[in-house]
Amino acid sequence: MTSMMALIGELWRLERHILSDDYDRALKRLADELPMKIHEVASGTRVWTWTVPEKWTCREAYLETLDGKRLIDAKHNPLHVVSYSLPFEGEVSREELLAHLHVHPHLADATPFVFKYYQRDWGLCAPQTLRDSLKDEKYRVVIRSEFTPGSLKIGEVLVPGERKECFVVAAHLDHPAMVNDDLTGVVVGVEAARRLLAGPKPYYSYRFLFFPETLGSIAYLSRNEKLIPQMLGGLFLEMLGNDAPHALQRSFAADAPADRALVGALRGVEPGAHVGGFRNVIDNDERQFNAPGVRVPMLSLSRVVNPHLEGSRFYPYKEYHSSLDTPEIVSEERLEASVRLTMDLLAAFDRNRYVVNIFKGEVFASGYGLWVDYKSDAAGHKRRFEIMDRCDGTRRVADIAEELGLSFQAVWDVIDKLIEKELVSLSDEPQPTDPHLR
Ligand SMILES: [Zn+2]
């Protein structure tokens, strides 16, 4: 078993472009850690409104002065060449070079991550400081890149539950030589899958997906349309290693059972964590799952700074899409906290069913060992009865938590006791027990 930081250490420098040999190597390495099925979709395949692109390989890319002084070289950092850059070789004027030389918007010493999958152009990337120092009339550019037929690869780990209905956990594995975006989501997903596989069989099934962003989601969904109705919720994992509190983004539906369960569970772990609406925390593959014709309520978990907070200049985080997104900015401790939180969110989803009362009337609490003394704990006493009042076959666990402004866990603690005493049962469907509703 490899620690999350060790796995990051092995994978982060790989040139993980959306279709590339290094991406395939990284996915294969994940398959050593878990029972993984790898799906392949060939270049040129139509996937809904998209087409799978060709594989991209960059043999060599550099910029030098006419007297041969090498200024940047992709050998030292793959970010120096635009991902999916067209090949180019020749002498260019300073003006033309600057039109193709990309810099980071706020980190003057960092090389930015730039990709042009569909714009068909050549480009290099450098620190602002280097760009500012270019004074010669002409420079020499060499980009020896190739586009060849390949296949897009998606890794899938299935944790079978009692039900075939499932919850999808996803992260994207592409992005050369970067860590927080989104290798952290990948290693947290790998670790969560491992723990789920090692534990008792869950109620729902869990599908963990690792793919290149956007196209990976589209390719998987378009080739597995029959599974979509079984997907009851999802969680996209990303940017989980930087030093910031967790942030949870709701699904497009905003208030689906998955939203209520996960938001309620987050409340129990990090009461102050930022919860934002769809497309209001950070955009990624959850968009494809929530899109028209799919509508899987997929939330996303990250450590993105709240963009609405005063002083959040470095949204989503300072080193985003740059050569400074390295293992130094992430920690095993924070990744471990994200795995634990993910497990809590999944546990809440798994337990979030309708609570059906087997009892009638108010439960004789002290007779069942459920009494909370109101003299020593007035709030606990009231809360216990408020929860039991709502066990009537019309509310899920998370609905009760939402109604009472409690965490999912606080409600579950009581429901769990009621299940143990055979006073309630859980049901997939509502089962109203009010005789007036029959
Ligand atoms: Zn990114």
Image (cartoon, helix red, strand yellow):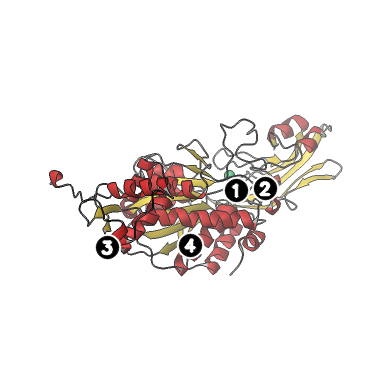
Give residue 429's position: percent from left, percent from top. 24, 52
- Residue carrying label 2: 325
Q: Nearer the viewer, mark 2 or mark 4?
A: 4
Give residue 278's position: percent from left, percent from top. 45, 38
Give residue 124's position: percent from left, percent from top. 70, 41
Q: Would you say the beta carbon of the disc 1 residue lies within 8 angstroms of ligand 1?
A: yes
Q: CA distance from mark 2 to mark 1?
A: 8 Å
Which label's residue is closer to the chain start, 1 or 4?
A: 1
Residue flagged by tag 3: what amino acid is it?
Answer: Glu
Residue flagged by tag 4: what amino acid is it?
Answer: Ala
Q: Secondary structure at mark 4?
A: helix
Q: Nearer the viewer, mark 1 or mark 3?
A: 3
Mark 2 touches mark 3? (CB < 8 Å): no
Q: Quadrant of ligand 1?
A: top right
Which label's residue is closer to the chain start, 1 or 3?
A: 1
Instruction: Examine the rendering and report whether any part of residue 170 can be seen.
Output: yes
- Residue carrying label 4: 193
Q: Nearer the viewer, mark 4 or mark 3?
A: 3
Q: Residues within 10 Å of mark 3 (few under 14, many from 20)?
A: few
Mark 2 touches mark 1? (CB < 8 Å): yes
Labelled disc at residue 422: 3
Q: Secondary structure at mark 2?
A: loop
Mark 2 touches mark 4? (CB < 8 Å): no
Instruction: Examine the rendering and report whether any part of residue 48 can be seen.
Output: no
